[in-house]
Image: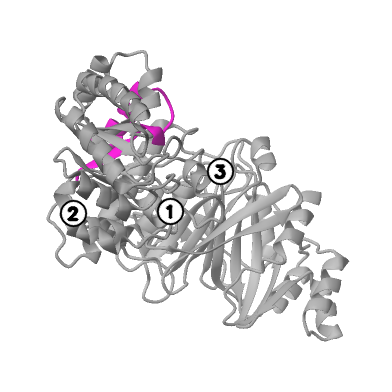
């Protein structure tokens, strides 16, 4: 599978972009004309640099407004095209993207557009150049790939074919099934972009909100498979207009982009019974079944130890070779790490996931090219494989134990006898994301661990909306809400400005709250107005509401069940939540989140 990317996808100068694409492993690039115009290098120097980096120059783009015009305007089109074709010869590029007219079109006639593309093809052929005609989703007359293909058929010129762009086709809801009617040799180029489903004008949607494959709501697997079936053998190229990607480090974004194409290649090869040999599958993923552990790291973790003791966790001792402690309650395991943490306040530094095939996950992560996490392990200790998520969190995976504790727990010594507790395990781990990492993080967890996006919502807080996206594993054993702070908060702390938190599931959360209070625990206090609203919204008895108020419990219910929970106060950059799910409730108490955010802000 030959991979390519438009230089518009990433930040920097044209030379910077070429270096980033080469380092990420792309085979080629599309040259976006404004990048070339702003470059101090000559076209020959750009071509030479690409050659030294091992990159092919696959496409020059865009040439706009070339058809559907009167004779006088078309004469100007030919003069402009002649200059661009001579420029392309200097670059060594033999394919140009021509978009359907959005500005100067005055003639809505397929035969006129076809004749003009034919004449443009004659000019291009004299330079050894071909034309890939693309229907823009906001084209003046031509906004559907099927009409673009009819016009190319009418043009009947060997140098004129179509470019198929997933955004322009899928954003308009056009059925990709008719791609099968286009001969593969007339599909000159393919551009890929994902996107969230948004209700807005398609031009703004395209210019600001495209995503890399696997990060949005488009069915790119089906779209790409149809093009493969049609016999296309050219580059698979990313054309992603996104404000975030064009502001962040080019090398990181290019690696992110290449990973998305590798994921797409895998999904297409799995979806096609007779996939071409050049489409390679990734090693099978072993989706996690549960959270193995969470790790809080700080120079001094004594405050977290005190809190866990109040909440009914048991100290399982210190690690025999490292300044690390373990606290457990049921199958919930909290590692407290003071190693290499000078000056750190408590923060969630790592999570461990239980999987049924460690080697499969390891192979898949290596093939995806994710950065690996390293920890020194001595001969008698269990080795944990791990990767570094885009937000910096270390994510480890370990073989799920058939019963009892995992093997690594035996490395902790001089622990206490486990206390009886109503806490049974980890319900979910909320990971706060820097503004520029949430899309990359989504791909990291979906491509690497086969998690899926379950829901997305915006939670109002005292300083703006918190965007939350929930990822879940098949079977629901792992839930990872990814939260992005409002810009005002992100600016305050140059990235993650929301505390991370771990939610523990309980068989009886009221009992956990009462026992914790007897040990001196002080929960995050919820205001009286909140409980007045609960009494109004839900058919609870006065005694039930009084109990919730007394224990500072949050409450929610839906058609499937109920959700009861309480929060600890924040220590450093982390807090804990304790939840009880009644029946089949699958949410996260979204109605309580704004109240919690305000309460935390007051503190």
Residue ID at (36%, 41%) = 100
Q: Position of residue 70 (x, y in %)?
A: 36, 33
Q: Position of residue 175 (x, y in %)?
A: 35, 63
Residue ID at (63%, 82%) = 561
Tag 1 near tag 3, CB within 8 Å: no
Q: Is residue 41 visible?
A: yes
Element type where label 1 sits in the image: loop
Which tag, 1 or 3, sits closer to the chain's start? 1
Q: How many C-alpha atoms fall within 10 Å of the one at disc 2: few (<14), some, or many (≥20)?
A: some
Q: CA distance from mark 1 to mark 3?
A: 16 Å
Q: Is residue 26 visible?
A: no
Residue at the front extreme? 71
Q: Nearer the viewer, residue 591 or 403?
A: 591
Residue 274, quarter of picture: bottom left
Element type where label 3 sits in the image: loop
Q: Nearer the viewer, residue 315 or 561?
A: 561
Q: Nearer the viewer, mark 1 or mark 3?
A: 1
Q: Position of residue 56 (x, y in %)?
A: 20, 31
Q: Is residue 45 left or right of residue 122?
A: right
What residue does disc 2 label? 279
Element type where label 2 sits in the image: loop
What residue does disc 1 label? 215
In the rendered image of this protein, does residue 371 appear above or below residue 84? below
Q: Is residue 556 left or right of residue 505?
A: right
- For the record, the magenta segment spans 1-27
Q: How many C-alpha atoms fall within 10 Å of the one at disc 3: few (<14), some, or many (≥20)?
A: many
Which tag, 2 or 1, sits closer to the chain's start? 1
Residue ID at (30%, 55%) = 146
What residue does disc 3 label? 434
In the rendered image of this protein, does residue 198 appear above or below residue 588? above
Q: How many C-alpha atoms fall within 10 Å of the one at disc 1: few (<14), some, or many (≥20)?
A: many
Q: Is residue 461 left or right of residue 400?
A: right
């Amino acid at each position: 599978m030959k991979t390519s990317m438009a230089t518009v996808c990433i930040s920097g100068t044209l030379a910077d972009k070429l270096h980033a694409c080469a380092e990420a492993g792309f085979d080629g690039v599309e040259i976006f004309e404004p990048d070339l115009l702003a470059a101090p290098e000559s076209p020959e120097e750009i071509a030479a640099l690409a050659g030294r980096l091992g990159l092919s120059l696959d496409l020059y783009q865009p040439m706009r407004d070339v058809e559907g015009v009167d004779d006088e305007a078309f004469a100007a089109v030919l003069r402009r095209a002649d200059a661009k074709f001579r420029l392309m010869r200097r670059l060594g590029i033999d394919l140009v993207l021509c978009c359907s007219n959005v500005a100067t079109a005055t003639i809505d006639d397929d035969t006129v557009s076809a004749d003009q593309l034919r004449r443009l093809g004659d000019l291009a052929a004299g330079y050894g150049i071909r034309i890939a005609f693309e229907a823009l989703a906001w084209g003046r007359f031509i906004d559907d790939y099927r009409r673009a293909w009819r016009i190319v058929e009418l043009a009947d010129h060997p140098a004129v074919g179509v470019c198929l762009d997933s955004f322009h086709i899928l954003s308009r809801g056009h059925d990709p099934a008719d791609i099968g009617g286009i001969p593969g040799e007339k599909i000159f180029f393919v551009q890929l972009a994902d996107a969230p489903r948004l209700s807005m004008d398609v031009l703004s949607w395209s210019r600001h909100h495209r995503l890399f494959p696997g990060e949005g709501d488009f069915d790119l697997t089906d779209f790409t498979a149809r093009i493969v079936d049609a016999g296309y053998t050219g580059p698979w190229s990313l054309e992603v207009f996104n404000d975030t990607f064009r502001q962040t480090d080019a090398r990181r974004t290019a690696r992110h982009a290449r990973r998305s194409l590798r994921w797409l290649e895998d999904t297409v090869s799995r979806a096609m019974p007779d996939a071409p040999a050049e489409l390679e599958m990734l090693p099978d993923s072993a989706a996690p079944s549960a959270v193995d552990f969470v790790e809080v790291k700080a120079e001094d973790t004594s405050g977290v130890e005190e809190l866990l003791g109040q909440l009914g966790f048991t100290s399982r001792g210190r690690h025999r070779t490292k300044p690390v402690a373990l606290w457990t309650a049921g199958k919930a395991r909290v590692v407290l790490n003071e190693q290499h943490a000078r000056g750190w306040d408590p923060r969630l530094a790592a999570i461990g996931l239980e999987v049924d095939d460690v080697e499969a996950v390891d192979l898949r992560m290596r093939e995806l090219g994710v950065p690996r996490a390293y920890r020194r392990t001595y001969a008698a200790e269990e080795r944990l494989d791990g990767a570094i998520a885009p937000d910096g969190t270390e994510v480890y995976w370990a073989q799920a134990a058939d019963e009892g504790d995992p093997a690594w727990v035996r490395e902790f010594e001089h622990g206490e006898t486990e206390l009886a507790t109503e806490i049974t395990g980890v319900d979910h781990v909320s990971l706060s994301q820097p503004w520029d990492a949430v899309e990359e993080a989504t791909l990291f967890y979906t491509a690497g661990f086969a998690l899926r996006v379950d829901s997305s919502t915006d939670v109002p807080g005292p300083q703006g909306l918190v965007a939350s996206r929930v990822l879940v594993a098949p079977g629901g054993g792992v839930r990872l809400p990814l939260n992005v702070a409002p810009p005002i908060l992100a600016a305050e702390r140059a990235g993650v400005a929301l505390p991370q938190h771990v939610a523990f599931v309980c068989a009886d959360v009221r009992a956990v709250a009462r026992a914790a209070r007897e040990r001196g625990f002080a929960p995050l206090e919820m205001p009286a107005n909140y409980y007045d609203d609960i009494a109004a919204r839900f058919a609870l008895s006065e005694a039930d509401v009084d109990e919730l108020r007394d224990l500072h419990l949050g409450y929610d219910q839906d058609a499937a069940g109920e959700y009861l929970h309480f929060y600890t106060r924040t220590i450093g950059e982390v807090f804990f939540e304790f939840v009880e799910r009644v029946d089949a409730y699958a949410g996260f108490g979204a109605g309580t989140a704004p109240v919690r955010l305000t309460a935390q802000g007051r503190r």
